[in-house]
Amino acid sequence: MAMETKRLTESATLEAWAIRTRLFKVGDELAPFVIESLEGRPLVEGDVLAVTSKIVSLSENALTPRSEAKIDVIKREADQYLGEGGFGVHLTVKHGLLLPSAGIDESNAAGDFYILLPHDPFGTAKALWNALRLHYKIHHLGILITDSHTQPLRRGVTGISLAHWGFGATQDLVGKTDLYGRPFKMTSVNAADALSATAVFLMGEGTEPCPLAVLRGARLEFRPESDPNETRIPLEEDLYRPLFSGPNSRAISAGPATAGTSSIS
């Protein structure tokens, strides 16, 4: 289904709702699960579908037994291991994100294993985008693979985008002017993370089976391709680089970067 880059909506109203589903099982296929779960309320032009990374991991069988020492799993899964932080938490970089324990999850795992982050979240987002556009016969659709994370000096978790497809994840304001006519010099809006925060808030943290959310009315530029590096900042350019460069940090080679991975050395 051919499409061209297009800003679909100028609406300032955003609708969003979580989708309660059956439990997703290891090895289930994502696209049929989404279509089944959205029965009676289909996706329409300009929608963004958010999918929690946990069911993406389960679809990929991205699991490892708890019998393996967790620190060994963390170091194997991390793109960069930064060392032990507070409260025994190990700080890492994974898929271009600063995450504790390489994003390994011990909750919502029906069995004696850890749930790892998806191996190729961008590849999964693209495949789901293709399947759902074809099924619903729509052109403009956004896909988000979401996770939750903590932020330094802030309590609680918020949602973040692990991967996106079908729209521009950032909106560059450099050269435009603010309300008082002053030009923006550095500002870029991260639409993918902003929408992910909304979606994760609605989906909750696992007390109910709501692994999907639909966001409707977002002002986005829909496009047929997405770049994993659009939201990532190289380590040498990051504002918080000193935090990544302590004596305990250790880069772990993850091989060549692919559509869904980031290797930092």
Image: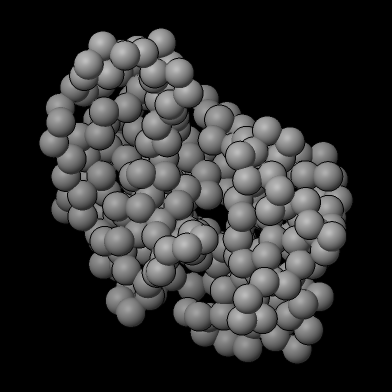
- Tell me if residue 247 comes above or below residue 42 in the rendering: below
The picture quadrant where one finds residue 89 is bottom right
Q: Is residue 34 left or right of residue 55?
A: left
Percent of width and height locating residue 170: 44, 29
- Tell me if residue 264 comes above or below residue 249 in the rendering: above
**Which residue is depicted at the point 38% across and 49% down?**
196
Q: Is residue 234 left or right of residue 121?
A: right
* The N terminus lies in quadrant: top left
The picture quadrant where one finds residue 166 is top left
**Which residue is depicted at the point 57% across and 80% down?**
106
Q: Is residue 1 left or right of residue 230?
A: left
Look at the image and name its color scheme: one colour
Percent of width and height locating residue 38: 26, 54
* The C terminus lies in quadrant: top right
Q: Is residue 212 left or right of residue 114?
A: left
Percent of width and height locating residue 177: 31, 13
Q: Which residue is more in the foreground, 172 or 25?
A: 172
